Structures are given as C-alpha cells and as structure tokens.
Image: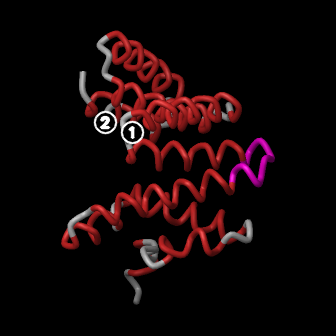
C-alpha cells in the first residue's frame, strides 16, 4: 500500500466522473492504512475522500472529512495534506454558506502552501508552484480570499499565479 495507490488510482476516476468508485477505493485504502497504522497515508486518503464527497455534492461530509484529515495531519506535520484539506474545507464551507469560516480555511491553506514553498530549495520553487494542481489551488484560494475581502491573506500566493495555458499560448 502506498501513495501511488491512494492518489494515482483516484485521479482517473475523478476525471471520468466515477465518483462512487473513487469513494469506495478511498474508503478501502483508508481502512487498510488505519489497520497498518500508516497515519500519513490515512490522512492523505481522508483528504482525498473530502474532495470526492465535495464533487458528489456531499458538502457536510466533505467538511467533516477535511477536518478529520487536518486533525490527523497536524499530529505529524503533514503540510501537503494540510494545504489540500484546508482548501477542500474552504470549498465545503462555501457550499454550506458559512462564508467567514470558509475564508479562514482558505487563509490557512494559503499559509500552509506558503510554508511549504518557503522550505523548498530556490531552484525547485518555480517547478513546484507551477504544478497544475498547485496552480488550481492558488487560483481558487486567491479568488476566494479576494472575493471575501481578505486580499492581504492571498498576498504571498498572488505572485505565483500563472496565466492558464490556453491564455499564454497567444501572447
């Protein structure tokens, strides 16, 4: 059991809209990670489950799973899980019409991601911040914080926003 199984097998199912299959696979992976006491993998799996719940329209379940992933990842300083879980929590809270809590979650996602970026070697920062998954997170987080009047919380991420690939090909 490894992270490739947990996340690599899920992305195609999400892209194909096979959310029920993704949920079943993640639930099974979580159970195995729990049995093997692989807490980092379990936290990562719970964070992925939160995203699946959100995609299925289960906002309250997504909120609860994101909070659980955050709690687990906090215990072992799992920053990559934390920024994803906080971003998912922000989305779930937005859908639940809990705007201030959502902004708090997005602000935490921003600070977690900035902490990770700050810990990278300078030559690795551009490639990390340019990853498509990171760009989606940065774009959503900056938009949510700007829209909620918390532009200062998005300040450190704003400089890493890149134009979408389609827009940059013509310039």
Q: Which residue is mark 1?
A: 11
**The residue tagged with tag 2: helix, strand or loop?**
helix
| Quadrant of the image occupied by residue 62 | top right
Q: Quadrant of the C terminus?
A: bottom left
Q: Residues within 10 Å of mark 2 (few under 14, many from 20)?
A: few
The answer to if 158 sits in the magenta stretch is no
Give how far apart the Cα atoms at labels 2 and 1 are. 6 Å
Q: Residue at 36%, 35% (x, y): give it.
A: 76
Quarter of the image holding residue 65? top right
Position of 130 relative to 105 (above/below): below
Is the Cβ of the residue at disc 2 closer than 8 Å to that at disc 1?
yes
Q: Which residue does the numbered mark 2 point to in the structure image?
A: 8
Q: Is residue 35 above or below residue 140?
A: above
Dominant SS in magenta: helix
Which residue is most to the right? 97
| Display coloring | secondary structure
Q: Which mark is residue 130?
A: none
Tell me which segment is drawn in magenta: 94-102
Place of residue 88 in the rendered image (x, y in percent of width and height, measured from the top left): 57, 44
On screen, residue 118 versus residue 156, left or right, reads: left
Q: Residue at position x 47%, y 37% from top?
A: 14
Q: Regarding mark 1 in the picture, which secondary structure is present there?
A: helix
- The residue furthest front is 75
Q: To which quarter of the image does residue 35 belong?
A: top left
Residue 150 in the image: state x and y as whole percent: 68, 69
Q: Quadrant of the N terminus?
A: top left
Q: Residue at x 48, y 73 (%)?
A: 156
Q: Residues within 10 Å of mark 1 (few under 14, many from 20)?
A: some
């Amino acid at each position: 059991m490894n992270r490739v199984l947990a996340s690599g097998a899920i992305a195609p199912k999400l892209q194909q809209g096979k959310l029920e299959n993704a949920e079943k696979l993640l639930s099974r992976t979580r159970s195995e990670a729990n049995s093997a006491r692989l807490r980092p993998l379990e936290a990562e799996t719970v964070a992925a489950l939160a995203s699946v719940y959100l995609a299925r329209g289960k906002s309250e379940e997504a909120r609860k799973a994101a909070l659980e992933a955050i709690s687990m990842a906090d215990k072992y300083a799992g920053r990559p899980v934390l920024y994803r879980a906080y971003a998912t929590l922000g989305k779930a809270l937005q859908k639940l019409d809990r705007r201030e809590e959502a902004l708090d979650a997005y602000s935490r996602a921003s600070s977690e991601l900035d902490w990770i970026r700050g810990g990278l070697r300078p030559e690795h920062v551009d490639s990390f911040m340019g990853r498509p998954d990171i760009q989606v997170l940065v774009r959503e987080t900056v938009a949510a914080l700007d829209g909620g009047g918390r532009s200062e919380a998005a300040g450190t991420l704003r400089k890493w926003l890149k134009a979408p690939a389609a827009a940059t090909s013509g310039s």
